[in-house]
Image (cartoon, grey):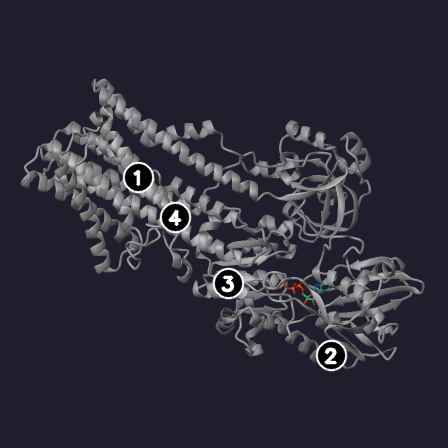
């Protein structure tokens, strides 16, 4: 790290850091520096070490209880039991370890995908690398919309301004320079420095990295207040609360069962052991880890479809999203601008690209057309020499327009060097530049018609500058172009002797004309919007463009009915009172789907407004101006190709292929993951309830015990976990996008879910107790035999319980559970483990499993299937359960 870099020149720093201002660091040197100084990241949270995961599994209350039980068994010389419990501990730790490892691995993979990128010069080549790979001495290249990824000293710049609010709280962008500063300059005034976490608002530049990771200013501030504390998602929090509550409930039941059994004259030691085993069994310790796996797998599945979810909780929020607020250009439209129509006083050119350069001879040499083309070339930031057309699509289209009309942009730019620029800004909606020529200076301006004509007092007509008094007529012409879905841009100019001051650049302009661009609606958007409609999700278009253009595109993508009255489109000016909207305005705003001529601030207001009205808002944005709204939205969505690094950094979701349609996949996945989590919670809890009820009722009724302590532990390791995990990985119901969004305030377990849990739990325990009663009173079997029959019944009925999980309205044979291959795999695995337990003598002895006659075994099968039939009957008659 370089001390006081603002006191030294970039060259001095480069020499000290063995870098080169023109060619950057050597690749090999960069590699060595990463090894020496580590990655450029602030929190060292990084990956959880494998041994840490293992140790964490041991620090679990269940393991404590089991260890005590093993120790007691050992002290009482009950070797078999002691060894069995140790095996149970090992299996439990093993399963916990692998499950958490899975979750951690998935999260690591996702974290890598969501990493910020940056442009550097290395060994003379311009590369796009992961920001974490930056080292001191790297030369970074910056452009508008980039987030600065390390502290750096400016090397060169062009109109570079940076918003440093993340660091200084100051929201006005500061313009950067390269000169050396004086010793007493405070950080906020160090104009020749760039700081990590700030954003480029205009211009471009080059800088040399002087500090990375925790050594940056941002790193220091964050480390003062933050110690890589792991944040816990709201879902995990809810699940933890649920678990805690269940633990208390279970403990209460356990104590009751022990007391009841004791009063009924059962062996106290056995009752205590059963109680402990029940407590261990019924505590749903797997809930939050299975939920994490389900979320992480959902995210990985999406990443294969080019949707990157940056935060785990976003998956869950996506499922509850009911409003999507989107911009127009590039999201609903192709963003492939092409000039279609040119309007100027005394001339109209339509279907521009169907004509050849000679067709424009009639206007060439006429000052007015020449000036429009010149404005297109000069008031334009796209490089004329660049092979790849990078930059604003309107400006790329304008250069194409000039070339197609037979002009040479390169010559015109060389003859008219730019001296001053008022950059385009989504609030101001115009851009102006001043150029030197042989007569002095000439200002060219382009922008939204309403904004440009405010400053136009003159018009160029018949070769003369005249007073501009037909503004109304031009308004109508612009409306007419916009109503065809064209994006319109107005042009103006003025000549001056001196270079005008920046604030006077657009005063007293001479109006030139209008250009209309085609930007066709994307083909696939309409179908996606129809899907959203069915899914109860409202799509809102909020654009900076003209209301008529917005309306036409909205009609084409199905957001508005064809020929809807123009009052359906609200405008920026209708949003002035949005913060304290009365009832009437509120209704109007809630009804509207298209907002035109809105500023980025108004987009933020719209998000806030809908959130206040209890909506969960997803917001799509790509510019640096969209950052506040992206942050404020419940789900910020940025584009991978078109979006700025700034938008991508704050977003929760990145659409790598820029496709609006991809959000539908994300929402669908969000809904599915939540449904899956609900399903396995219902499944696990109903299985646990069945165990508690079977043992509890048997104790109360003085029946032979259906489950012995070790059997309970076995059940929980074998029959619960795998099917629950499989449910967590399901692909979801086919009609998940035909239902309304979930209410975000809804708990994980609704009343219906609790009802379902009870019905399933009671059905299973009814069949277990049924077989106990039948075996005791009808078959008059020994308690050992009865216990075995009850145990097998419980194993089987827990396994078939997965088929209870789908909604009653779904077919019993063909639903998302029967189609889930993981479920079948889990059932086969669980059955195989039960058979193995029976076949391996020490295990069979520990679990007290004996040979059952085929008749008795088939009775267990019949009773287990009985529980399934019973539940299905209750479900289909009651029609109220899941
Ligand atoms: P969306 O939010 O759908 O992307 P948009 O791209 O039309 O909308 P802005 O980029 O804010 O919104 O543009 C608003 C208006 O500013 C445009 O309708 C156009 O008239 C004008 N404009 C757009 N780009 C430029 C530019 N490069 N130079 C000058 N004016 C521009």
Percent of width and height locating residue 599: 63, 64
Relative to 32, 105 lies left or right: left
**Which corner quadrant of the figure contains ligand 1?**
bottom right
Q: CA distance from mark 1 to mark 2?
A: 75 Å
Percent of width and height locating residue 871: 22, 52
Task: Verify CB contact (< 8 Å) between mark 4 and mark 3.
Answer: no
Residue positioned 59% across, 39% down in the render: 222
**Which residue was labeled with disc 1?**
828
**Which residue was labeled with disc 4?**
730
**Which residue was labeled with disc 3?**
528
- The mark that comes first in sequence, 3 or 2, is 2
Q: CA distance from mark 4 to mark 3?
A: 23 Å
**Furthest residue in direction right, as rendered:** 438
- The mark that comes first in sequence, 1 or 3, is 3
Indicate which label's residue lies in the foreground, 2 or 4. 4
Indicate which label's residue lies in the foreground, 3 or 2. 3
Percent of width and height locating residue 263: 10, 35
Q: What count of labels does the image hold?
A: 4
Relative to 331, 815 lies left or right: left
């Amino acid at each position: 790290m370089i001390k006081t870099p603002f006191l030294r020149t970039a060259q001095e720093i480069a020499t000290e850091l063995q870098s080169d201002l023109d060619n950057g660091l050597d690749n090999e040197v960069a590699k060595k520096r990463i090894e020496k100084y580590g990655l450029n990241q602030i929190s060292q949270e990084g990956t959880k070490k494998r041994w840490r995961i293992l140790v964490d599994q041991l620090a679990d209350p269940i393991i404590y209880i089991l260890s005590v039980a093993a120790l007691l068994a050992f002290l009482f010389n009950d070797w078999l039991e002691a060894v069995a419990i140790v095996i149970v501990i090992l299996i439990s730790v093993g399963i916990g370890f692998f499950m958490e490892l899975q979750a951690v691995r998935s999260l690591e993979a996702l974290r890598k995908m969501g990493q910020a990128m940056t442009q550097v010069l290395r060994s003379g080549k311009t590369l796009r690398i992961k920001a974490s790979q930056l080292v001191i001495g790297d030369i970074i290249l910056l452009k508008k919309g980039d987030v600065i990824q390390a502290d750096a000293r400016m090397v060169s710049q062009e109109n570079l301004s940076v918003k440093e609010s993340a660091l200084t709280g100051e929201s006005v962008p500061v313009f950067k320079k390269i000169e050396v500063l004086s010793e007493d300059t405070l950080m906020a005034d160090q104009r020749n420095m760039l700081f990590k976490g700030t954003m480029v608002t205009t211009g471009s530049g080059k800088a040399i990295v002087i500090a990375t990771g925790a050594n940056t200013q941002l790193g220091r501030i964050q480390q003062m207040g933050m110690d890589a504390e792991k944040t816990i998602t709201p879902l995990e929090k809810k699940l933890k609360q649920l678990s805690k509550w269940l633990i208390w409930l279970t403990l209460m039941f356990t104590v009751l069962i022990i007391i009841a059994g004791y009063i009924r004259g059962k062996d106290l030691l056995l009752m205590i052991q059963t109680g402990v085993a029940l407590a261990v069994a019924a505590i749903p310790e797997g809930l939050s880890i299975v939920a994490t796996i389900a979320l992480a797998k959902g995210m990985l599945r999406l990443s294969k479809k080019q949707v990157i979810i940056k935060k785990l909780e976003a998956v869950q929020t996506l499922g509850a999203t009911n409003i999507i607020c989107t911009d127009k250009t590039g999201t609903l439209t192709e963003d492939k601008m092409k000039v279609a129509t040119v309007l100027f006083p005394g001339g109209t050119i339509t279907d521009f690209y169907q004509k050849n350069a000679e067709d424009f001879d009639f206007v060439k040499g006429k000052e007015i057309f020449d000036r429009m083309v010149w404005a297109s070339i000069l008031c334009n930031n796209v490089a004329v020499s660049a092979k790849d057309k990078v930059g604003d699509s309107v400006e790329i289209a304008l250069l194409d327009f000039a070339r197609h009309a037979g002009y040479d942009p390169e010559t015109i730019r060389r003859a008219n060097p730019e001296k001053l620029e008022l950059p385009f800004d989504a609030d101001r909606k115009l851009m102006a530049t001043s150029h030197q020529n042989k007569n002095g200076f000439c200002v060219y301006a382009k922008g939204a018609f309403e904004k440009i004509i405010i400053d136009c007092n003159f018009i160029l007509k018949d070769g003369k500058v005249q007073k501009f008094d037909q503004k109304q007529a031009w308004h109508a012409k612009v409306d007419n172009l916009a109503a065809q879905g064209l994006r319109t841009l107005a042009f103006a100019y003025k000549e001056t002797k001196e270079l005008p001051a920046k604030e006077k650049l657009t005063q007293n302009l001479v109006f030139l004309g209008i250009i209309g661009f085609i930007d066709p609606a994307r083909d696939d958007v309409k179908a996606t919007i129809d899907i959203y409609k069915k899914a109860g999700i409202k799509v809102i278009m909020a654009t900076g463009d003209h209301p008529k253009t917005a309306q036409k595109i909205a009609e084409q993508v199905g957001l508005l009915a064809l020929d809807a009255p123009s009052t359906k489109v609200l405008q920026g000016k209708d949003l002035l009172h949005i913060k304290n909207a009365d009832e009437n305005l509120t209704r109007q705003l809630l009804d509207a789907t298209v907002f035109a001529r809105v500023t980025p601030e108004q987009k933020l207001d719209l998000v806030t407004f809908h959130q206040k009205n209890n909506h969960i808002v997803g917001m799509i944005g790509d510019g640096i101006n969209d950052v506040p709204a992206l942050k404020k939205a419940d789900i910020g969505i940025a584009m991978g190709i078109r979006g700025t690094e700034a938008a991508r950094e704050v977003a929760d979701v990145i659409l790598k292929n820029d496709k609006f349609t991809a959000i539908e996949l994300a929402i669908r996945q969000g809904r599915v993951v939540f449904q899956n989590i609900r399903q396995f919670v219902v499944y696990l809890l109903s299985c646990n309830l069945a165990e508690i009820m079977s043992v509890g009722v048997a104790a109360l009724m003085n029946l032979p015990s259906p489950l012995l302590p070790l059997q309970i532990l076995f059940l929980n390791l074998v029959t619960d976990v795998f099917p629950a995990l499989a449910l967590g990985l399901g692909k979801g119901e086919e009609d998940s996008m035909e239902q309304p969004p979930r209410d975000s305030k809804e708990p994980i377990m609704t009343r219906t879910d609790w009802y379902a849990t009870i019905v399933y739990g009671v059905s299973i325990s009814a069949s277990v107790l049924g077989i106990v009663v039948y075996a005791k009173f009808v078959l008059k079997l020994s308690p050992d035999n009865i216990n075995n029959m009850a145990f097998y019944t419980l194993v089987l009925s827990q396994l078939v319980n997965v088929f209870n999980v789908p909604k009653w309205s779904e077919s019993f044979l063909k639903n998302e559970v029967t189609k889930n291959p993981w479920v079948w795999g889990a059932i086969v695995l669980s059955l195989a483990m039960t058979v193995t337990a029976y076949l391996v003598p020490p295990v069979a002895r520990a679990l007290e499993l004996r040979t059952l006659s085929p008749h008795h075994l088939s009775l267990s099968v019949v009773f287990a299937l009985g529980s399934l039939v019973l539940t299905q009957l209750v479900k289909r008659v009651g029609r109220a359960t899941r």
